Amino acid sequence: MSKKKTQKKKKAPDKPLLSAEEEIRLKTLLENLQDIDPTKIEEQIQSSEVAQALVKKMPLEHPNTVTILASIREAFDQKSVQKEIKRALFKLERKGVRIPEADQPEKTPFEIQKTESAEPNIYVGPIDGSGGRVLFMALPRVPKGYDIGMGLVNDEEGFLEFVSGTYSKKQMKEVKTLFFEKVSPLVETSLSHAATILEGIHGQAGSGRTDATNNYLQLRPLILNKTSLLERPAIYDFISSEDPDSLTDSRIKKLLNHKILETWVVPPEEIRPLMEEIQKTEESPIFISQTQKFDRVNEIIEKALDKLYPESKRALLKNRLEETAYVFFKLEDEEYARLSLAAARSIEKKDSILGVNPFLKALLQRTLDLYFKSIKEMEQPKEGSEEDASPTLILP
């Protein structure tokens, strides 16, 4: 008797399990193959399971099939995805379609596109009241990977925190995601803009060498070899100018009340002598009426502006306002961008006999109000007491 041949069970084809959300994404991708950007393939597909399913179901006759397959092959190295790609490429080769291999020396359309897409990832945050801001940069390496630099920098104190290193593409994306989770808002910018910021800060950092400064110095040659510094603030590439005379008191108040500028105050150690002088005026028996006290306080404040904002400080504040205008513009808030730029332009104007700079005076007034309010809250006067009825400081 002949032995019965035992039939081997056919191995079920690999079939990725997709969530409801991934099923919807897959359907959308299949319906819009012509809109898939090969340079952003990971961002659009998001998971290896969707990538495998897309390769399996993608029509071979579609004009974008070869390019998309090549992009997926480069972006997703999971065995299940690579296996599905090999099946698709085999079918295409049987139809006479030439498939470029990854190790071929000649440039293929996909390889050219890949080179063009390897752009730096550069982001900056707004400047806070002390002159600090965060910055993230990822510079593509050849043939692969990224040189990353990120941290907190200050236009007066230099590099407060700054780290640098070399990462793979996947690691770069993970680091970027974590960084963005901790810091917001961040706006995308050019390498030349970031280089200009960093070089300006490096020039202010003095001769002291810290770990943060050393980390920047390791990355510095790579940055300067790839770009040149800006000749003017980046905002002027988008808004040519703004009339400083358009900066009314109400517009200044509106600008200072924005969340991005909420930390813009004069440091306590710089304003303490002024506060003590104002307090003495408030308590002085010489000034009988509130009008006399008001006029004297106003005089004290206007004289203090020259000490608090010498030429060097004004130049620094002007640059901060121009950089803030750029952040607002990138956040698609042109109104506040123009407000910031008008404030920056106003600082260029010398104080006239008609009065001091309105933006600087408003900034100082806001600071005084905040500090005096804080002191009053700390004292916690009892309700109904004479202390509670003392007048608050109101400046024009």
Image (cartoon, rainbow, N blue to C red):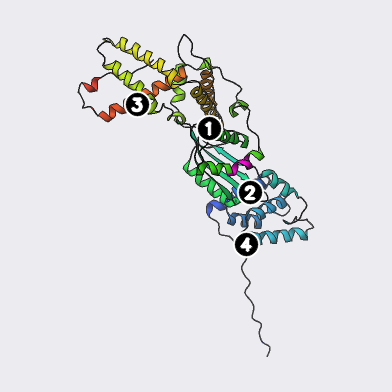
Q: Write down the residue under mark 2.
A: 41
Which one is earlier in the sequence, the residue at label 2 or at label 1?
2
Quadrant (top left, top right, bottom left, bottom right) of the N terminus: bottom right
From the viewer's perspective, is residue 385 above or below residue 165? above
Q: Which mark is residue 79?
A: 4
Label 4 crowding class (10 Å Cα cut-off): few <14, some 14-19, many 20+? Answer: few
Q: Are marks 2 and 1 in contact (CB under 8 Å)?
A: no
Front-lying residue, 18 or 372: 372
Which residue is depicted at the point 57% across and 42% down? 217
Magenta stretch?
218-223
- In space, the residues marked 2 and 1 are separated at their CA atoms by 41 Å
Which one is earlier in the sequence, the residue at label 4 or at label 2?
2
Q: Nearer the viewer, mark 4 or mark 3?
A: 3
- Secondary structure of the residue carrying tag 1 is helix
Q: Write down the residue under mark 1.
A: 204
Quadrant of res 272: top left
Q: What is the three-letter code of the residue carrying label 1?
A: Gln
Q: Which mark is residue 354?
A: none
Q: Write down the residue under mark 3.
A: 371
Front-lying residue, 75 or 172: 172
Quadrant of res 198: top right
